[in-house]
Amino acid sequence: AQSVTQLDSHVSVSEGTPVLLRCNYSSSYSPSLFWYVQHPNKGLQLLLKYTSAATLVKGINGFEAEFKKSETSFHLTKPSAHMSDAAEYFCVVSDPAGYNKLIFGAGTRLAVHP
Amino acid sequence: GAVVSQHPSWVICKSGTSVKIECRSLDFQATTMFWYRQFPKQSLMLMATSNEGSKATYEQGVEKDKFLINHASLTLSTLTVTSAHPEDSSFYICSAGLAGGSTGELFFGEGSRLTVL
């Protein structure tokens, strides 16, 4: 069965410092992995996706993630945090049981302090 | 980009009543939409897959008679919580993907917060 584990429920950084949100996955096949962001009162938005192409994936707003099969990880990073990055972030894996069926991690709440 | 809209964004109802939540794809057609439930400070749990013109496919443990899903057109899916009880209070979210789009690349509604008194 496919699953994702987000290792931190809360991450707090100062504005301008790097962001690291950790995600490990479990999959019996080569997975498709995603990071989605949820801002308050807004719908979830796709940040980036990995679908077996380049292992380093660049997304929107300066975020990127690296797929590491040996570590079964897909950590999300950003060199310099901005106040507007404060949100809930979800690591997601596709479920082969159905097209566009997604399995969400528990989420990581990112706080950015001035 | 593609836009998915939900209505209402929040609703309060009395126990025993039914509540309908709409999910619309505003600028694209969606043969398939997804309904999720999100408890406070928890992740999204897929409830069902809504298929235009056919019956919804429910995930294990989701009561079909409690959560009625109708997908009557290519731009509208509705979720009706029947005989709502306080334990049904939650944040309900829908999503849809573009036909022929990359798998997993979904567009989400803003969510509908249901409070049952």
Image (cartoon, coloured by chain):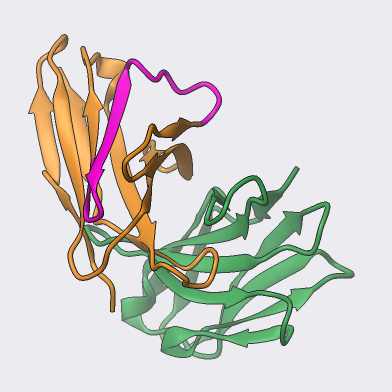
Image quarter where the C terminus of chain A lies is bottom left
Residue A50, x across and y down, in percent: 64, 75
Q: In this view, does B58 lie above or below A80?
A: above
Indicate left or right for A74 with B109 as reference: right
Task: Answer with the quarter of the image where residue A45 lies.
Answer: bottom left
Indicate left or right for A36 with B93 as reference: right
**Which residue is more in the foreground, B10 or A50?**
A50
**Which residue is more in the foreground, B108 or B26?**
B26
Residue A110, x across and y down, in percent: 45, 65
Residue ID at (83%, 52%): A28
Q: Is residue A28 above or below residue A75?
A: above
Q: Colour of chain A?
A: green
Chain shown orange: that is B
Q: Can residue A114 be seen in this view?
A: no
Q: Is residue A83 visible?
A: yes
Residue lying at the far top of the rendered structure: B16
Task: Answer with the quarter of the image where residue B97 lies.
Answer: bottom left
- Residue B97 is covered by the magenta coloring: no
Residue ID at (74%, 83%): A55
Residue A105, x across and y down, in percent: 57, 51
Residue lying at the far front of the rendered structure: B53
Task: Answer with the quarter of the image where residue A22 lies.
Answer: bottom right
Residue ID at (65%, 45%): A97
Residue B116, x across and y down, in percent: 18, 21
Residue ID at (62%, 57%): A94
Residue lying at the far right of the rendered structure: A70
Q: In this view, does B68 lie above or below A101?
A: above
Image quarter where the N terminus of chain A lies is top right
- Residue B75 is covered by the magenta coloring: yes
Q: Give the range drawn in magenta.
A: B59-77
Q: Is residue B113 above or below residue B89?
A: below
